[in-house]
Structure formats: C-alpha cells, structure tokens
Amino acid sequence: MIIVMRQGASKEELTEVKKRIKELGYKPHVIHGETRNVIGAVGDERGKSILQSLESMPGVENVVPILKPYKLASKEVKPEQTVIEIVPGLSIGSDALVVMAGPCSVESEDQIIETALAVKSAGATVLRGGAFKPRTSPYSFQGMEEEGLKLLAQAREASGLPIVTEVVNPRDVELVARYADIMQVGARNVQNFALLKMLGQLGKPVLLKRGMATTIQEFLMSAEYVLSEGNRRVILCERGIRTFETATRNTLDISAIPVLREQTHLPIIIDPSHATGHASLVPSMCFASVAAGCDGLMVEVHPHPETAASDGPQSLRPEEFASMMSKLREFAAVAGRTL
Ligand code: PEP
Ligand code: MN
C-alpha cells in the first residue's frame, strides 16, 4: 500500500504513521518527495487491507494499493528517477553516464593495474573485474578469489576508480563487501533469493544483472528482494537474454531500457560484452544503448584478449576502448547526457 502524506504533514505525524504500520506487521519505507512524503508499506499481501485504516490518521491524505507486484521498485511508489551515490563524487542515474570497464576476471597485478589505468584515462569511472567467477564448466578458471579482491583494491588505490565485483555465494558476501564499492549479482544468481536478501541488508550499492531467461517483471521482483530489506541502492543491468539466435552470445534486449524506464525509477545500465560475445559488436551496442536512454555501461576490456583467462573474444583492447569512448562522447551529447 502507498500511504500518501498531506503536503505539510509534520515529522511527528510521519513518525506516528510509520509506527502504526509496524504495529500492523508491515515495513514502512519513506520516500521523500519534492512536495510531500509517501510511505510504501510492504509485507504480506494477504492482510494488506488492514492498512486502509491508516487513512484516518492525522497527516494522511489517502491510502492506495500498489497495483504492480513489485512495490518499492515501481514508479507508483516513487515516480522520480533514483540517483544512487556510488562513492562520494560519483553517482549513477543523473545526466552523467557511468562507464564501468575492466577485465572479465582479475588475473594478475600487472593485468588489473594496467587495465585500470587505461580505462581511467579513456574516461571510465568504475573498474570492473571478477574475483569469484560463475563459470558454466567446473573445469574453467573459477577466479582468484580473495587474492583477486586484494589486487582489485590495489588497482583502486593506483587508479582512484571504485570497484565493482561479483559475489557468487551468500557465504562470501561479507568478504566481498570488505573490498567492493559495488556488489555485482550475476545473471545466474538473479533469483538467488538468499543472496539478494543478504545484499538488501548491506549498505553497499548492488548491481543486479538480468538473468538470461528472466522476464522484466521477474527482474524487477528480484530487485524488490534487495529493496524490501532496506537497501535502496540497486542498479539494474541488462546483459542479453537467450533467444534462438546463435550469431551473438545472447540477444541484447535494447527495448528493456525504455520498458524499464516506464516501470521503475532505478538506474539502468547495459553490458554489451556478455550480450554480444564479440568485441567487434560492442561499440555499436554501446551507441545504441545510449540512444535508448541507459544510465551507464559495463564493458569488458583486457590488455591481451588473446590470452585472457575468460571472455577474451568479447573484450576490447585498451586502445579500442579509448576510441569507442571518444565516439561515445558525441552520442552522449546528442542524447543529452555527459560522459
Ligand atoms: C560478469 O559480468 O563477469 C558476468 C559473469 O556476467 P553475467 O553474469 O552477465 O553472465
Ligand atoms: Mn565475462
């Protein structure tokens, strides 16, 4: 239910309403609007009509049901676009596009530091790199684990770029959170609800990737798991879905950008590397994504793609990334964004 407070309702009235929501067994999530506050009351769908009684409390204008199955992720609860502060001085969801770039996997100190410095000088503002890798085969490289996290921290130190890295298993959440600025949930874990709930209790931004067979509604329900635990900093990432097409690794669902834009206030980024699987296709998908209104990109970059431990064929060389970024700046300007 959405509890719409009157314009000018007092702080005390808001506190009383929150208290009553809790007494009724629901969780209040206050969204501070420009002219008035609203409270999203979420919890067991079955008994929610009891919340209607809040309408008679001082300061309450009305109580309306949230029609979508996802609540806190919906524009019904929060019509204004969410801007998430990643680290002081860097936000996502505003006019400034955020480009996250780096290798698929962290492989060595030289590799990650060289890549960090190169992507930074090309204009990336976040460094990506996997230390825990969710691989299709148990015989493929599984990542450097904590050693990889330490190298990422060194690369952050050397470049000044915040880091995004994946957490694959709920038991590693605390460990990854000690190093990461953004916690990435990979496509294969989009419905790992235990993991999502843990990340919802953490005070770090979460980059949630769409699963390869996840509908947009299911994707937003996964975001809702994080939001409903109290973490409002969720970034959505479209990374291609599985279709009958085999020319590309996945099929990039560009229309997910405007569709999500209509449904949610959360920032949306695109990963054209995992979507296409081919480095040559990455730049055009970046341009298209910016034209379609994304808030940022995640691009795989490797100094030597031919020897990469994972995803070499889809990784741009640093010079290819730099050239793509300089063209992207022109597209961004036309789309009313900065880079
Ligand atoms: C990744 O970004 O490293 C990754 C494994 O991507 P995805 O989860 O989208 O397959
Ligand atoms: Mn990869």
Image (cartoon, rainbow, N blue to C red):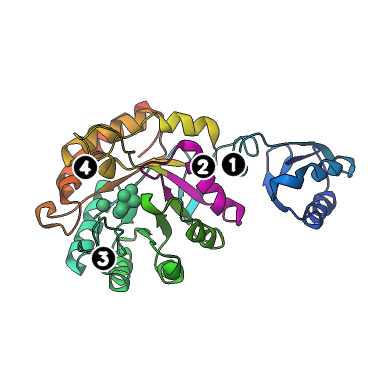
In the rendering, at what x and y percent does residue 15 appear? 80, 54
Distance between the alpha carbons at the discs numbered 2 and 1: 6 Å
Q: Which mark is residue 143?
A: 3
Question: Residue beneath label 4, please?
Answer: 277
The N terminus lies in which quarter of the figure? top right
Question: Residue beneath label 1, please?
Answer: 70
Residue at 31 percent of width and 29 percent of height: 288
Distance between the alpha carbons at the discs numbered 3 and 1: 34 Å
Whether label 3 touches label 1, CB < 8 Å: no
Question: Residue beneath label 2, please?
Answer: 220
Please name the amino acid that badge 1 sits on.
Tyr
Mark 2 vs 4, N-terminal side: 2
Q: Which mark is residue 45?
A: none
Distance between the alpha carbons at the discs numbered 2 and 4: 25 Å
In the rendering, at what x and y percent does residue 278 appear? 18, 41
Residue at 39 percent of width and 68 percent of height: 179
> Does 258 appear above or below 298?
above
Provide the secondary structure element on which disc 1 rests: loop
Please name the amino acid that badge 3 sits on.
Gly
Whether label 2 touches label 1, CB < 8 Å: yes
Distance between the alpha carbons at the discs numbered 4 and 1: 31 Å
Residue at 42 percent of width and 39 percent of height: 295
Mark 2 vs 1, N-terminal side: 1
**Magenta region:** 208-236
Q: Residue furthest top?
A: 334
